Image: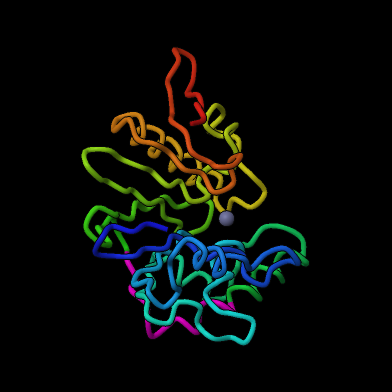
Amino acid sequence: MIDTGRHQVLIDTGAGQLGPDTGKLPGNLRAAGFAPDGIDTVVLTHGHPDHIGGNTDERGRIGFPKARFVMGEDEWNFWNGELTGLHGDEQLKKLLRQAARRNLPPIRDQLDLIDREREIVPGISAIPAPGHTPGHMAISVASGGEHLLCLGDAMLHPIHVEEPDWHALTDFSPEKTIASRYKLLTFAMDLNARVFGFHFPFPGLGRIVRTPERWRWQPL
Ligand SMILES: [Zn+2]
């Protein structure tokens, strides 16, 4: 959740109804002082269930009714298409398919698709980083001369900073995932950015440092 002063921007909507312990985002937002209908921009890094699950509530209503939903065009087209090339067993594929069917078509009228690096609101930009999914995006945040890079799921664990060539079962295209990681690691180093990884150990914030042999994750 990013409050720029002019915009209230949410990056991804959590897992929603995915499991027995998920779906706490709306309550946590309220506890932090943000009403879901005050959020004007929702950025979706990619279409996996734990990132789009809060687009709708348990009754199918849109969780952020006044927001513009920003998503990569390739990502939208993939999850609203035939879903050929998905990895994993049938159970996982079914889960992915159902979450996309439930959480993406309802936002159609609030959708803003992007197909290149672009500023979403002043200071917050989408950085295409395909591979984990076909149209996956990372997000860059700039404020007061400092930068934060939200990796999305381009890296799922700090080990991917040290071993960028190791890909995960859920990475749609290993080759593109790896290329995106090198791009993001270089981006973070060049800007001395704080880096945020959704699936990194809480709170998921750190910096990338470079040793002669490799990159390293330095938690904050
Ligand atoms: Zn993912």
At which x and y percent is residue 106? 49, 84
The residue closer to the viewer here, 111 or 124, is 124
> In this image, 83 relative to 193: left or right?
right
Residue that appears at 41% across and 34% down: 185
At which x and y percent is residue 98? 66, 76
> In this image, 145 relative to 141: left or right?
left
Coloring scheme used: rainbow
Residue that appears at 63% across and 62% down: 86
Q: Quadrant of residue 182?
A: top left
Looking at the rendered structure, the number of numbered marks drawn on it comes to: 0
Residue that appears at 34% across and 51% down: 127
Residues in magenta, as a range: 101-114
**Image quarter (top left, top right, bottom left or bottom right) of the N terminus:** bottom left
Q: Eyeballing the image, is 215 above or below 191?
A: above
> In this image, 114 relative to 160: left or right?
left
Q: Quadrant of residue 113?
A: bottom left
Q: Eyeballing the image, is 95 above or below 130?
A: below
> In this image, 38 relative to 105: left or right?
left
Q: Eyeballing the image, is 199 above or below 13?
A: above
Instruction: Determine if the magenta segment contains residue 19.
Output: no
Residue that appears at 45% across and 46% down: 151
Q: Quadrant of ligand 1?
A: bottom right
Q: Residue furthest top?
A: 212
The residue closer to the viewer here, 142 or 85, is 142
At which x and y percent is residue 44? 45, 64
The residue closer to the viewer here, 158 or 10, is 10
- Dominant SS of magenta comes to helix
Q: Eyeballing the image, is 155 above or below 3?
A: above
Instruction: Determine if the magenta segment contains residue 102.
Output: yes
At which x and y percent is residue 155? 53, 42
